[in-house]
Amino acid sequence: MQPEITQETQIEAPANRQMPWLLRWLPIAATSLQVVPCFFFLSLSGLRTAFGAVALLSAAIAGPFEFFHQNKLRVPFFLIAGGLSLLNLYLYTHVKRLRARPSSQWRMQTLSTKERRVQRIQLVSSLLTLAMIAGDILNHKLHGFGF
């Protein structure tokens, strides 16, 4: 015969049976304290190895490419690239100035997204070219390699 279950003998489960906040996050926090530093130091070691390998490889293959870095080739390329960049900047500012004139306002059409993007690329590439030329010249001056 089974005992009769009455209201007094029934065990009720609590309505809100959640674990405390600390107990929920403690395992992931403990694991993170173990894994994150290990991952960081292994990655750092791998990066050092990769940097060393790239430096060794670049030193080994730099010899044949030194021909292209001679002043007799570098200077004309810089003059051509710098001149074309300056011409590009001049044309960019000239178009802006022409579009801003009062006499051209009556026939102005707004630029499409593609045209604005092309103009931005034109401006950025010209400025980046001039900055790279200046950086290379400065680098050669600082390290005593001449122009």
Image (cartoon, rainbow, N blue to C red):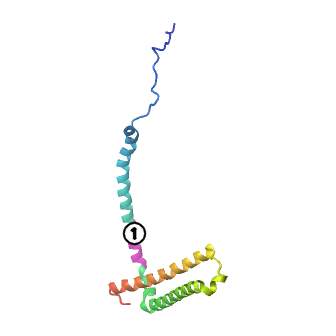
The amino acid on which the numbered mark 1 sits, given as a three-letter code, is: Ala
In the rendered image, residue 98, in percent from the top left (x then y), is placed at: 59, 86
Residue 7's place in the image compared with 129, above or below, is above
Task: Pick the residue in front: 140 or 98.
Answer: 98
Residue 59 counted in the magenta span: yes
- Name which residue lies at 38% across and 48% down: 32
Q: Secondary structure at mark 1?
A: helix
Residue 24 counted in the magenta span: no
Residue tagged 1: 53
Say left or right for 28 vs 86: left
In the rendered image, residue 121, in percent from the top left (x then y), is placed at: 55, 77
Could one spot residue 64 in this view of the protein?
no
- Name which residue lies at 62% across and 87% down: 103
Say left or right for 102 vs 69: right
Write the start and end of the magenta stretch as one range: 50-61
Task: Pick the residue in front: 96 or 104.
Answer: 104
Number of callouts: 1
Q: Main secondary structure of the magenta part?
A: helix
In which image quadrant can residue 147 be found? Answer: bottom left
Residue 45's place in the image compared with 82, above or below, is above
